[in-house]
Amino acid sequence: MAYIGTIPAEAYTSFAVQHFTTSATDTFTLDFPVANENEIALFINNVRQEPGSSYAYTASGTTLTLSSAITGSDSMYCVFIGKAVQTVTPAVGSVTNDMLASGSFSNITGTGTLTNFTSTGIDDNASANALTIDSSSNLKFNSGYGSVATAYGCRAWVNFNGTGTVAIRGSGNVSSITDNGTGDYTVNFTTNMPDVNYFIGDGPVPIGSASASLQRTTYLVGSVRVRTRYATVADYDWSDVFISVFR
């Protein structure tokens, strides 16, 4: 009849072993308690002893009693037959590729080369090192650089209308724009910069306004203040303001 129910897990079994420091005595302490002497196999000078009160030894709890004392020059060890140590984790280095089923893996650690790796949206077809995360958590990749180099990402960007009521058209890591007055704006970051040593880039000036300029006035970790100007009119509201932040 076929087995009905959960398939039992295959266990890897080993027996606990205790080596004794011998002396001229007949009483020793076991590492693990036992019901009686039949739960251990005792070896003296590599010869297995017969258990029982009429023979070589008895055992109860953690007390092992020999029928006669041994000397310090004797060797003695026991195997706990009644205490089998089981685990469903195989020994280190015993798992082969054939044992691995297709599917998801987590908490994988170790060293080596990952080959034939495929995942939805990710595929490793590089013929050489193409992507690295170094010990400082810097992401490095080769995407037209000619070599693997650190990628300096855009920390924030915004495209907004600076006339009338200021309105953000699109942004990244920008929570809001504060209108401080004519041609004077504060770009507020959603997540602060690590310091004030960042770079501010701006987009094209308004069409037909070659004398226009965007000035950066106040750098803070949580915001940057900019002014849009025409050389002949000073501060002036622009309809299209583009800001990008790199660090």
Image: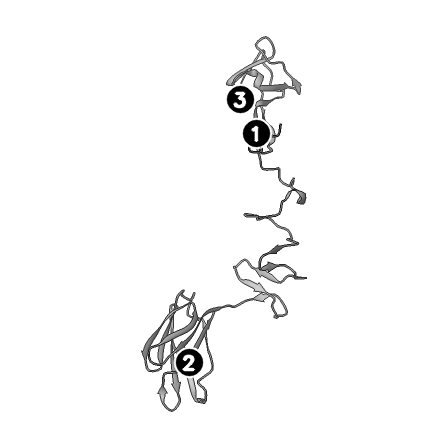
Local SS, label 1: strand
Going by the picture, which residue comes out furthest to the left? 181
Residue at x-position 63% and y-position 70% = 146
Using the numbered discs, state the Cα–Cα distance from disc 2 to disc 3 in whole angstroms: 84 Å
Task: Give x and y (percent) for residue 128.
Answer: 66, 62
Indicate which disc, 1 or 2, sits on the residue closer to the N terminus: 1
Extreme residue in the front direction = 1
What is the CA distance from the residue labelled 3 to the residue labelled 1?
16 Å
- On screen, 236 above or below 38? below
Circle number at residue 240: 2
- Residue 3, relative to residue 111: is it above or below? above
Residue type highlighted by circle 2: Asp
Q: Which label's residue is closer to the chain start, 3 or 1?
A: 3
Of residues 63 and 185, the one drawn nearer to the viewer in this rendering: 185
Residue 237 in percent (x, y) is at 36, 83
Q: What element carries label 3?
A: strand
Label number found at residue 112: none
Q: Position of residue 85 (x, y in %)?
A: 57, 29
Residue identified by numbered label 3:
30
Relative side of 140 to 48, left or right: left
Q: Which colour scheme is used?
A: one colour
Looking at the picture, how far across and down is residue 126, in whole percent?
65, 62
Q: Which mark is residue 85?
A: 1
Residue type marked 1: Val
Residue 245 occupies which quadrant of the picture? bottom left
Residue type at mark 3 is Leu
Number of numbered tags placed on the structure image:
3
Q: Which dot, 3 or 1, sits closer to the camera?
A: 1
Question: Are dots 1 and 2 in contact, CB under 8 Å?
Answer: no
Report the residue at 61% width, 19% height from top. Answer: 42
